[in-house]
Image (tube, rainbow, N blue to C red):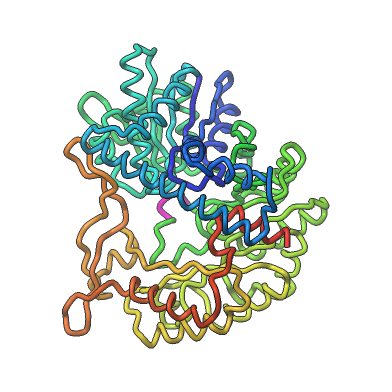
Amino acid sequence: MRVVLVFPPRASATYMPLGIASLASYIESKVPGSLVRLMDLNLAAWIQAADQDPKGKKLIHFVRGHQGMFTDPGQTLYHKSIWDRLRQKITALGRQAEMFLASGALSLALKTLLDSQVRLILAHNPGLVGISVLFPEQVPFASALARVLKQAIEKNAVPRCRIVMGGAMMSALSVPDLMTAVPEIDAVVCGEGEEAAADLCAGTAWPDIPGLIFRQGNTIQTNPGSRTISLKHLPAPDFSKLPIPDYFNPMPVLPVLFSRGCAWRKCRFCAHNFSFGGYRRKPVAAFVSELEHYHRTLGVTHFYSADEYILPTDMDAICEEILARRLSIFFHILGKPTADCTPGRLALWSAAGCKWIGWGIESGSQRLLDLINKGTCVTDIQRVIKDSAAAGISNLGLMIFGLPTSTDADMDQTLAFLSDIYEDLAGLTASAFVLFDKTHFARNAGRYGLKIDGPVDLFHSNHTAVKSGRLKFREQAEDGSYRALKGTVEVARWQQYRRWLGEVPLKEQLPPEHVLIHITSA
């Protein structure tokens, strides 16, 4: 079977889609004779936006390393202004996709983009088009693409071509609502997609495919959940099917995945656990062989971890294997700042090429860390951040402001904590607390003074609202009234406070792939 896998907007133009690259190699290894093509519609949207901007070509030449000094701060800030303008255009395309789904009105810019991509898709004469959706912002684009693609299939009397949607977002929205709103979608894969994708390509009867939700006449059928697969013999993602030189990076930065799921799985605010089954990891030697393969065949020296986080013991083994093979690479991970992240360990990780860690700090209040069941200690976090910086690793602090029951005293403690470690941070993300369905805080909203007003709508179409797993909520004050969300207030307070600590670091303003390149070029 001929298969086209699509990654729609809206994501960064620096990101190479790991999901469709993984599916491509799995399908071709399991279904002999299948031919898989990958299309990055997100990248195409960015290139279209750049082509239509007076300075877009200048930006492309800069970010691809063809002109200027990529790591020069002044040049970076200059080109960032162009980048921001293009991002606004991509965001506007998202709103146009929502309008098209709601009313049928298709803007010229969106029509140009979708029509060109539909022509390319159908030129491959596929029997299956898979649309991979990772982020909430992609859902309207993906749905608009499905609609225009189905119209083209019917208009041109193309031999039967099925449209299937999948990806992590399918576990974070109402699939029946999505399929009602967008009848052009033939099926949705919930959960891990490899086996379902292979079954679809092999011609397995749809009622027999685990994890598949599909249209049967006027009804929507839901099969039992997808199987959790072992990572031991999973083929490496095939990035060679993507236009690597076209991404907005001066050198390729590949996303890689050592494990699936979360080894901790106890944080009370987190919705990521709904995307995968239990925690599993690849054999260390096999994972490092993937890195070595990309290094040898594609010339890749920079890697960006897509894991929830990697356990210190696993990091030790990975780094020892990298050093044993004398691989000269650089990489980023997400980490949990616990007591077992010792100076010796951090030095080992740095020596192997780990030069940037995004630390899940969340708060500087021990009361709140205990409340969210983070499993960390403020004093340990402070020590780990300082030791990491001393080992030559750049630290990104990941913070959540406005956690349930947060008080001014908690915020004071957090500000004092951040002041203490600020000089050891290369950047900090300040996120306001988001309430997700099925999490501990959603199930026990009343206990924490939260009033849930319903799910956030992603878009409207066909008289149906497509709902996400994100919830609208209000917070109750001590007098029983409802106040402004604490997250918004605390983020604003942090932004005002940080002015006393210095300017916002440049690395905090860049996409992750560019941060890694800047760090390793210093």
Viewer-proximal residue among 109 and 438: 109
**Quadrant of res 215:** top left
Q: Position of residue 404 (x, y in %)?
A: 33, 74
Q: Please report the residue visible at 32 percent of the width from the left and 44 percent of the height from the top.
A: 95
Q: Give the quarter of the image for residue 71.
A: bottom right
Task: Give 101 or 306, whichever is nearer the viewer.
Answer: 101
Q: Is residue 112 magenta?
A: no
Residue 473 pos. (x, y %): 24, 65
Left or right: residue 112 compared with residue 300: left
Magenta region: which residues?
273-277
Nearer to me, 280 or 351: 351
- Measuring from the top left, give residue 254's x and y in whole percent: 63, 46
- Image check: 492 left or right of 479? right
Q: Residue furthest front?
A: 54
Quadrant for the C terminus in the image: bottom right
Q: Is residue 276 magenta?
A: yes
Q: Position of residue 383 (x, y in %)?
A: 63, 81
In the displayed structure, would residue 201 be above or below residue 299? above
Near-viewer residue (291 or 282): 291
Residue at point 29% right, 48% down?
458
Q: Is residue 453 left or right of residue 22?
A: left
Residue at figure coordinates x 55%, y 21% from the top left: 34
